[in-house]
Amino acid sequence: MSNSFDILLVEDSPDLASNIIDYLEALGHRLHYAADGEAGLREALVRPVDIVLLDLALPNRGGLSVCSEIRRRADRRIPILMLTARDTLDDKLAGFAHGADDYLVKPFSLAELAARVAALALRPQLGQPHCFSVGPLTIDRQARTATRDGQLLRLTPLLWELLLLLAEAWPNPVSRDEATLRLWGDDPPSSDSLRAHLHLLRQVVDKPFDRPIIETVHSVGFRLKVVP
């Protein structure tokens, strides 16, 4: 394959870990393995990996705690994909709140896992510093905070994810499907929650300021409209 990555798998099920390792190595990736949370955290902080596959229910230290510590202590942005049997919206929000980039519910197909790995590892922010700016916005991925013109934006976890998605995609637009998948995975709400959340995001990011920077791109999606 044209793109291969160094992947850290933190998973306490030997059978599942073996299946994942065999499958991803056959695709050309380089796998590193830890069977508990403490070992996984150590590996993530000392080994230059491109992505972490992190089980949620781990011995010694849970996946949420491991995720938070990686975000707090790592000197660069490491994409983290959580693997878990917990599938409620609250579980997913907890994962995102602790710093996860994506969330895959067990049982899953190995082909889908490989696709998620490729999508995450190729994101533009791979290995980049935690803080970056887009026009008047300053985003801190480690602290999970955003400011506009130096003013802190008070964002719920879902609004933070939506703004982060727009900022990371800039200057390109984000489609409705992409935003829905980022916020709710494969189980989106039945109502038009994305429209409601975009309205709420505009209330925080645009309304208090002199000009809007979130714009709708007709038949495409949404993007940040700022001068480079």
Image (cartoon, grey):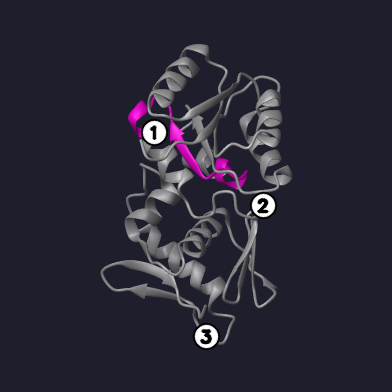
Q: Foreground residue, 228 or 85?
A: 228
Q: Quadrant of residue 147?
A: bottom right
3D distance between C-alphas at marks 1 and 2: 25 Å
Residue at disc 3, secondary structure:
loop
Q: Which residue is mark 2?
A: 142
Eyeballing the image, is 188 above or below 19?
A: below
- How crowded pointer 2 is (Cα within 10 Å; few <14, some 14-19, many 20+) is rated as many
- Residue 166: x percent and y percent? 47, 63
The three-letter amino acid code for the residue at tag 1 is Ala
> Looking at this rendering, what residue extends furthest in the front direction?
2
Label whose residue precedes the other's in the sequence (1 or 2): 1
The three-letter amino acid code for the residue at tag 2 is Gln
3D distance between C-alphas at marks 3 and 2: 28 Å
Residue at disc 1, secondary structure:
helix
Left or right, 177 with respect to 48, comes to left
> Looking at this rendering, what residue extends furthest in the left direction?
219
- How crowded pointer 3 is (Cα within 10 Å; few <14, some 14-19, many 20+) is rated as few
3D distance between C-alphas at marks 1 and 3: 41 Å
- Residue 106: x percent and y percent? 43, 26
In reply to whether residue 144 is colored magenta, the answer given is no
Please give the label number shown on residue 190. Answer: none
- Which stretch appears magenta? 94-113
Q: Which residue is mark 1?
A: 114
Nearer the viewer's eye, disc 1 or disc 2? Answer: 1
Tell me the residue at 71%/21% (across/down).
Answer: 60
